Amino acid sequence: MRVFKHIKKVASYAAVGGFGAVIAAGLAGCGSDNGGANNNDGSALKEAAQKTGAFVIIEETAPGKYKVLEEYPSSETRVVLKDINGTERVLSKEEIDKLLAQANAKIDNNTSNLTRTSDAQLSSGGLSLGETILASAAGAILGSWIGSKLFGNQNFQANRQSTYKNPSAYTRSVDSFNKQKAANSAARSSGGKSGFFGGGSKSGSSSSSFGG
């Protein structure tokens, strides 16, 4: 299955964040390509991501245009950029803060592709890097201060799937974060540890670690 192609790659970032093995285990359990996605998936993603973290790989699909290639729950939040030449690097917190501020300004100015009534721009090539980060699971954590501007926006909810490289990437993300949400709920009910990371429900968006 295609998802296993990413296990070695994600594990290679273990030296950066120390969680490659955890993510690889999560990848092995999140390869389902079922069609159960719906507009409520964004809420599940937001809730689960904020209680743990997210590992996101963003790919440049055309010059200056980006889409989410892969994303999964993680013990830490990191964003990896794969540029149009195939070069990959972890974005720094400073870079992401600047990009999110720019994306937020577009929302306030009503010029953001994230809240357009049509997904033509998203489908044709992708979003700006800041918009793509904001639409990803990492955006639910690092961009949580933008809050209801996106997750309360019907256009964004309707078009969010188009921010992913393909439907399979979107479905894998939905599956993995729904599983994390269920694990968090079970941990709260039992007073035990999260099924993904152990104690993941204790961490919130304000305490999610980030390394660049």
Image (cartoon, rainbow, N blue to C red):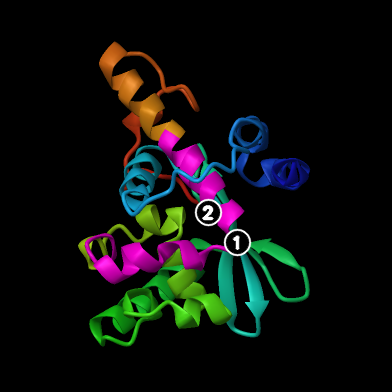
Question: Looking at the picture, which amino acid does disc 1 mark?
Answer: Asn
Displayed quadrant of residue 181: top left
Residue at 35% from the left image edge and 35% from the top image edge: 203
Please give left or right for residue 162 compared with residue 106 in the image.
right
Kindly report the secondary structure that dominates the magenta region of the rendered protein: helix
Question: Can you give x and y, in whole percent of width and height, for residue 92 in the image?
Answer: 54, 63
Q: Which residue is mark 2?
A: 170
Q: Which residue is mark 1?
A: 166
Q: Is residue 212 above or below residue 172?
A: below
Question: Looking at the picture, which amino acid does disc 2 mark?
Answer: Tyr
Is 197 magenta? The answer is no
Q: Is residue 131 above or below residue 185?
A: below
Could one spot residue 51 in this view of the protein?
yes
Q: Nearer the viewer, residue 81 or 174?
A: 174
Displayed quadrant of residue 31: top right
Q: Nearer the viewer, residue 178 or 146?
A: 178
Q: Which residues are magenta?
A: 150-178
Q: CA distance from mark 2 to mark 1?
A: 7 Å
